Amino acid sequence: MLKEVRDEKKYDVVLQKVIENVTKEGFTDIRADVPDLEAPAKLVSQNNNDVFIPDVTAQSKYGGKAYFEIAKKISETSKLVNKWKLLSTLAEIKNGIFKIFVPHGSMRFTRELVNRYNINAELIKI
């Protein structure tokens, strides 16, 4: 998620649910911006030098890199779309996956963005 929406308390609750889900699925080397874990690495888009930080990253038991995002309805979607495209591309390059966890009330918004911009991501209700 983008920095301006990370300051919400709701985000921390959903982030914990995502980390629990990723752990249950058997991912290792989980990284998230929470006290007990290492923060994910910053990613820089080659198109416009925007800096993005994934919500959660992990290593798949099959060796690929996994990226996880939490969807959030926002009015200015261009940076969000660029971030998701970048994460989708990196997951493809690294034989990994890209999943977007969608809180209640954000599925339609998220599905429309993913479909409109051809973002290869699995959407998961949370």
Image (cartoon, rainbow, N blue to C red):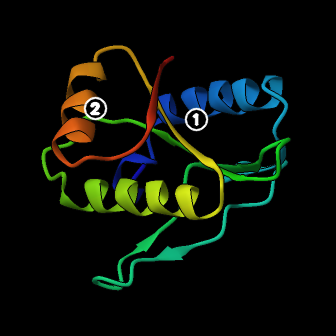
Residue displayed at 53% across by 63% down: 90
User: Looking at the rendering, which quadrant does residue 102 occupy?
Assistant: top left
User: Looking at the rendering, which quadrant does residue 72 occupy?
Assistant: top left
Residue 13: image x %, image y %?
A: 59, 27
In front: mark 2 or mark 1?
Answer: 2
Residue 51: image x %, image y %?
A: 43, 75
- Circle 1: element type: helix
User: Looking at the rendering, which quadrant does residue 115 occupy?
Assistant: top left
Give neighbour class at mark 1: few <14, some 14-19, many 20+ (Cα, 10 Å). some
Q: Who is closer to the viewer here, 4 or 79?
A: 79
Q: Reply above or below: 45 against 76.
A: below
Amino acid type at image mark 2 = Thr
Amino acid type at image mark 1 = Asp
Q: Who is closer to the viewer here, 66 or 11?
A: 66
In space, the residues marked 2 and 1 are separated at their CA atoms by 19 Å
Q: Who is closer to the viewer here, 3 or 102?
A: 102
Residue at numbered disc 2: 110
- Circle 2: element type: helix
Residue displayed at 54% across by 56% down: 92
Q: Reply above or below: 86 against 61.
A: below
Give neighbour class at mark 2: few <14, some 14-19, many 20+ (Cα, 10 Å). many
Residue displayed at 19% across by 51% down: 77
Residue at numbered disc 1: 12
Residue 50: image x %, image y %?
A: 35, 78
Report the side of 67 relative to 5 (left or right). Answer: right
Residue displayed at 28% across by 16% down: 105
Report the side of 49 relative to 109 (left or right). Answer: right
Residue 78: image x %, image y %?
A: 19, 59
Q: Which mark is residue 96?
A: none
Report the side of 40 relative to 11 (left or right). Answer: right
Q: Which of disc 1 and disc 2 is earlier in sequence?
A: 1
Q: Who is closer to the viewer here, 87 or 69?
A: 87
